[in-house]
């Protein structure tokens, strides 16, 4: 089934991660250089200081880098797990900021939840088809050894 989702040699999940990485890089650019644009619009309830904007930008740049690296290395278990966890951490962090500290409006959170949620579900569904988990021949060897 993984072959059915390929476009030009890269699985659709890889293309999705490139798109998400591109979105994240635009957010990073906004936090570094645009005080009244996307970054400050996300954090609407607090004044966006330069330090806060740059901190968010560096964190987002790291997660953007993970998306690009994982898109081209879907078979790497550690990289796949780190990218997956970056989405989990992003949803957790932004949800706490919205629900506990009220620094983000719920309307601003919807886009991030859609992107991170879609990525989390897709990556969970694709976990075994990208070389993760036991290989079929290894699974047969283990079951053979257990039955003997």
Image (spheres, helix red, strand yellow):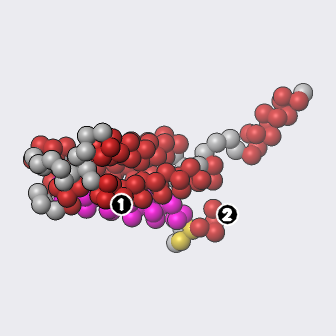
Q: Is residue 147 above or below residue 15?
A: above
Instruction: Name the dominant secondary structure of the magenta segment.
Output: helix
User: Residue shown at 28%/43% (left/top)?
Assistant: 97
Q: Which residue is mark 1?
A: 111
Q: Is residue 135 above or below residue 145?
A: below
Viewport quadrant of the C terminus:
top right
Q: Nearer the viewer, residue 26 or 44?
A: 44
Circle number at residue 1: 2
First to last magenta residue range: 10-31
Label 2 crowding class (10 Å Cα cut-off): few <14, some 14-19, many 20+?
A: few
Q: Residue furthest bottom?
A: 8
Give the secondary structure at mark 1: helix
- Residue 60 appears in the figure: yes
Q: Does residue 40 appear left or right of residue 120 in this picture?
A: left
Q: Nearer the viewer, residue 51 or 140?
A: 51
Q: Earlier in the sequence, mark 2 or mark 1?
A: 2
Give the secondary structure at mark 2: loop
- Taking the magenta stretch, the answer to whether it contains residue 21 is yes
User: Residue shown at 31%/59% (left/top)?
Assistant: 107
Q: Does residue 100 appear left or right of residue 141 in this picture?
A: left
Image x and y of residue 43, in percent: 21, 51
User: Residue shown at 59%/53% (left/top)?
Assistant: 125
Q: Is residue 6 above or below residue 73?
A: below
Q: Nearer the viewer, residue 37 or 131?
A: 37
Q: What is the spatial separation of the Cα atoms under label 2 and label 1, in whole angstroms?
A: 29 Å
User: Residue shown at 29%/58% (left/top)?
Assistant: 108
- Residue 79 appears in the figure: no
Image x and y of residue 67, in percent: 40, 53
Q: Does residue 59 appear left or right of residue 76 in this picture?
A: left
- Taking the magenta stretch, the answer to whether it contains residue 3 is no
Image x and y of residue 113, in percent: 40, 54
**Residue 111 lies in quadrant:** bottom left
């Amino acid at each position: 089934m993984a072959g059915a989702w390929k476009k030009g040699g890269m699985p659709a999940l890889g293309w999705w991660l490139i798109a998400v990485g591109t979105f994240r890089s635009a957010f990073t650019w906004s936090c570094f250089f645009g005080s009244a644009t996307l970054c400050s619009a996300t954090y609407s309830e607090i004044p966006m200081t330069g330090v806060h904007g740059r901190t968010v930008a560096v964190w987002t740049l790291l997660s953007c880098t993970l998306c690009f690296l994982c898109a081209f290395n879907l078979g790497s278990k550690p990289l796949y797990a780190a990218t997956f966890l970056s989405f989990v951490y992003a949803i957790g962090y932004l949800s706490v900021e919205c629900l506990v500290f009220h620094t983000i409006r719920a309307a601003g959170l919807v886009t991030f939840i859609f992107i991170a949620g879609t990525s989390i579900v897709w990556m969970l569904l694709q976990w075994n088809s990208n070389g993760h988990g036991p290989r079929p021949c290894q699974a047969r060897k283990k079951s053979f050894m257990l039955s003997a």
